[in-house]
Amino acid sequence: MKKLTAILAIITLCLVSCKKEVKTETDTAKDSLAVKTEEPLIEEPLDSAAQMKAWIAYATPSEAHKLMADEVGSWNCDMTFWTEPNGKPQKSTSVAEIKMILGGRYQEAVYKGTMMGQPFEGKATLAYNNASEEYTSTFIDNMGTGMMVGMGKYNQAAKSMEFKGEMVNPVNGEKTPYREIYTIVDPKTRKMEMFDMKNGSEYKSMEIVMTKK
């Protein structure tokens, strides 16, 4: 009798469980039907003439590119570095050869000099995107294997560009933010300031004063 009672109890529990599962599946199906899905936005198609006009505007060098072209030539660079906040500054020098490439659409700067007693060579590119109206700066050198990429806009009042990006710390492999301010001091002088992060605080890690030959 006890075994029969136990068997009946198990069957009853199974039936109750099955009913709950069926109800849950039904409720889920109802809920999914009740959710309203938004129709995807469809862009208005442009005729071929409008598309061509947009691409021509995108590809044509603008006033921003003329500003970049003003820097074509040779520049003497006095560089100062700080490895930590309020640390002892280290000095170095280099020469930058700047030119416009790809039909005046991009600026390329090649740096050669010495750094910490070692031969130094670096290459920078600067682009202005007519569509997004922002600058993109890249930099590579023989002191590492990574590329620095920053994006920013030109402040006409301050005559400077502020770039923000990320770089990888070779000590721990982690990405850290950096900030760069590039100032047009006068027609023959430029100043670039780099700010890094250490222990959660920003500090000035580099300053380059460029003088046109």
Image (spheres, helix red, strand yellow):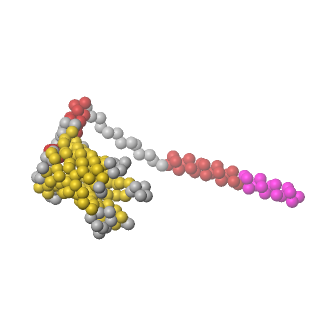
In the image, 28 versus 150, the foreground residue is: 150
Residue found 24% across the figure and 48% down from its top: 112
Instruction: State the residue in front, 56 or 7.
Output: 56
Between 122 and 58, which is closer to the camera in this rendering? 122
Q: Position of residue 64 (x, y in %)?
A: 17, 46
51 lies above or below 199: above
| Residue ranking furthest to the left | 187
Magenta stretch: residue 14 in it? yes
* Front residue (pair 95, 184): 95
Q: Quadrant of the N terminus?
A: bottom right
Residue at image point 33% right, 51% down: 143
Decide if residue 192 is in sight here: no
Where is 164 relative to 42, above or below?
below
In reply to whether residue 176 is colored magenta, the answer given is no
Q: Is residue 144 left or right of residue 125?
A: right
Q: Quadrant of residue 117?
A: bottom left
Is 21 placed left or right of 181 in the picture? Answer: right
Q: Going by the picture, which residue comes out furthest to the right? A: 1
Whether residue 199 is visible to the viewer of this picture, yes or no, is yes
